[in-house]
Each structure stands twice: as C-alpha cells, then as structure tokens.
Image (tube, grey):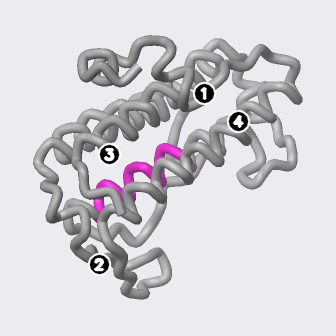
Amino acid sequence: MVQNPAYFQELFDYNDWANGRIIDRVVPLAPEQLKRELGNSFGSLHDTLAHMAGAEWIWLERWLGRSPAKLPCGSDFVGVNSIVEKLGKVRSDRRYWLGSVSADALSENVSYSNLRGQTCTYPLWQQLTHVVNHSTYHRGQVITLLRQLGNPVASTDFLLFFDEGNERSVAAGKR
C-alpha cells in the first residue's frame, strides 16, 4: 500500500494532464460528431466525457463527506465546454483537498453511500487509485471513438507525462 500523499498528488497531476490531452482533441469537433451514437458504453463522445466528469466529481464529493444520490449524465451538460468547466472545477477543488491529506489518512477507511443507497467502505488509497484507473479506462474509450470518427488522437501514456516534463517530477529529480 502506498502511504505517500505526494504520490497521489502526482498521480492526479497525471490524470489531469491526460484528461487535458483528450479534451484538446475533442473541443474542436462539431456538435454532430460529439453527439453521434457510436455504440460505446455511454454512446457518444459527449456522454462518455460527461460520465468521466461526473464520476470524478462524485468521488470528490464522497471524500468531502457528501454522498450525492445521482451522477450527472450527458443531458446535464449543454456542450463540451460545460464538461470542460466541470472537470476544471473538480481538478481545482481536488488539488486543494489532496494538499490536506496526510499519510495516515490514506490507510483510513472512508465510507460513502453509493448510487443505490448502499454503504460502501474502502481505504482512501484504494478509492484514489480507483478514480485514476476509471478515468484511464474511459480515456481509452474516447480515443477509440475519436478514431472511429476519423479524428487525430493524443497519447496519454503515463511515462509520456514524465517525458514531457511534469513540473513536480522534474523538480524532484524523478525523470
């Protein structure tokens, strides 16, 4: 188990960087491409991105002691810019919150109510890891959808994040 808050701050820096690379490829698309049903888990690029933003938001809410009963869905976002705004707000709030997480807190259990109203409890470090893994999964789906639409994609490889000079990693001599 990783009990290092700096590790999770860096992991979420990677997550935010990777989300940004995907968003850069999606924002220029025409609305009809964003909303085209392509048979994915959430149908369209728009709805997949909305799910990603909603999931990152709901997990932050849970870590802040709140358990929303509903996950935002595609229809809750007018367009891709509203999804970008939501991701930006979550990123900012999460970065602030992560700055207050201690090494001891990472191994503590955090309980929340899931969307079915059931109480779930996991160590904080597992929940943090889950969120980054979840976003990675859906970024892969977004890349596939972009390719299906004939659009260019961007690599979101974890090591590329370091190769491109992540500031925290470079400052710590971790390259």
Q: Residue under circle 2?
A: 111
Q: Residue 14 appears at what percent x and percent y? A: 44, 32
The reply to whether discs 1 and 3 touch (Cβ–Cβ < 8 Å) is no
Q: Residue 2 appears at what percent x and percent y? A: 33, 57
Q: Which mark is residue 142?
A: 4
Marks 1 and 4 sit apart, C-alpha to C-alpha, by 11 Å
Q: Quadrant of residue 110?
A: bottom left
Magenta region, residue range = 52-62
Residue 54 on the magenta segment: yes
Q: Residue under circle 1?
A: 156
Residue located at (36% from left, 30% from top): 88
* Disc on the earlier residue, 1 or 3: 3
Residue located at (46% from left, 29% from top): 84
* Disc on the earlier residue, 1 or 2: 2
Q: Which mark is residue 8?
A: 3
Q: In the structure shown, which secondary structural element does the residue marked by tag 4 occupy? A: helix
* Disc on the earlier residue, 2 or 4: 2
User: Which of the two residues, 104 or 134, is positioned nearer the viewer here?
Assistant: 104
* Type of amino acid under label 3: Phe
Q: Residue furthest bottom?
A: 118
* Type of amino acid under label 1: Thr
User: Which of the two residues, 11 or 139, is positioned nearer the viewer here?
Assistant: 11
* Disc on the earlier residue, 1 or 4: 4
* Disc on the earlier residue, 2 or 3: 3
Q: Residue 127 appears at what percent x and percent y? A: 39, 63
* Disc on the earlier residue, 3 or 4: 3
* Type of amino acid under label 2: Ser
Marks 1 and 2 sit apart, C-alpha to C-alpha, by 31 Å
